[in-house]
Amino acid sequence: MSDWLLSLEGTPAGHDLAFWLAMAAAVLHALFGALQKGRHDPWLSRAAIDASYGLIAAPVALFVVPWPEPRLWPIFLGMFMIHAVYKLLQAAAYDRGAYTVVYPVVRGTGPLVTVALAGVIFGEHFAPLQWLGVACLSGGILGLAAWNLTHVTAGRDTMLTALGLAGLTGLMVAAYTTYDAWGIRQSSDPFTFPAWFFMIDSLLMPALTYRRWSRLGVSGVIPLLRRGLIGALVAFASFGGIMLATRLDKVGEAAVLRETSTVFAALIGWLVLGERSGRMQVALMAVIAGGAVLVEWGGR
């Protein structure tokens, strides 16, 4: 599998596979966000997910994939720190604001920064049509957040704080997307970095939320453990998929396509969380989807 994946790097077939991995990651990332934001404490939800994917990833990292090269250990440390800041900011934002407001701000802030960082670090260049697509996508996402903000009634006293935290979280999304793309390219085997990423990344949230767990009874723990297992499987496909996409093809394109998750998040908010969508939201989601089409089409 590793040799086959490596043979696709920089090829048209690799570009196509990266596209589908990024789009799958978009759907799954929206589901991942909804799992964290659902009816449970978002800190405990994230801890349950992290613990689950850490336990699943550990035997794979230790006994299946090739052992990391020495140069990867400081990269793993940097990865852990960046993702730690991201998760703390995201949990705090979800704690204070409505999902349909917070999530679009997080996802809308990142694409422009990610594309800029990819240009500096990886020498990637976007065609003018692709830049138009990025502008449409980011503008549509932030417009969706603004529209939702005017119609949300619950938690308005903490919404300003939530928006600030969401903006900072978006910057961390750009940081970890670029850093992880660089990290996976330093690994000889493309599956070594994701396996160790999940094992190492799982350590923080369960430790931070130990006191919260101790206050739950059995009836409260079991639903969270179920949510954690589902979230772990979603995380493997979402985060792991986008890492592989950034190794196969352009980091900026994969990152932008992943942000169509906002469209799927709106659908989840409507169908699952009971947060209704109006005509303006549908129009903005069409702008987001159109932006993604321009990014993909303009790069061919």
Image (tube, grey):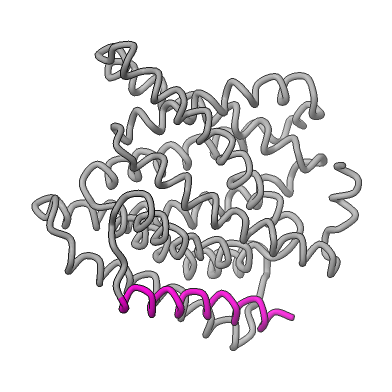
In this image, 298 relative to 105: left or right? right
Quarter of the image containing the N terminus? top right
In this image, 150 relative to 141: left or right? left
Q: Position of residue 96 (x, y in %)?
A: 21, 46
Most extreme residue toward the left is 157
Q: Residue at x 47, y 30 (%)?
A: 49
Q: Residue at x 33, y 73 (%)?
A: 281
Q: Say if 230 sits above or below 152 in the image.
A: above
Q: Decide which of 24, 104 is in the foreground and name it.
A: 24
Q: Position of residue 294 (x, y in %)?
A: 59, 82
Q: Decide which of 220, 82 is in the foreground and name it.
A: 220
In this image, 131 relative to 210: left or right? right
Q: Position of residue 285 (x, y in %)?
A: 42, 73
Q: Residue at x 18, y 66 (%)?
A: 151
Secondary structure mostly taken by the magenta-highlighted segment of the chain: helix
Residue 204 is inside the magenta segment: no
Quarter-wise, where is residue 122 in the image?
bottom right
* Residue range highlighted in magenta: 279-300
Quarter-wise, where is residue 213 in the image?
top left
In this image, 131 relative to 61: left or right? left
Quarter of the image containing the C terminus? bottom right
Looking at the rendered structure, the number of numbered marks drawn on it comes to 0
Q: Residue at x 34, y 62 (%)?
A: 105
Q: Say if 174 sits above or below 223 in the image.
A: below
Q: Position of residue 40 (x, y in %)?
A: 30, 33
Residue 284 is inside the magenta segment: yes
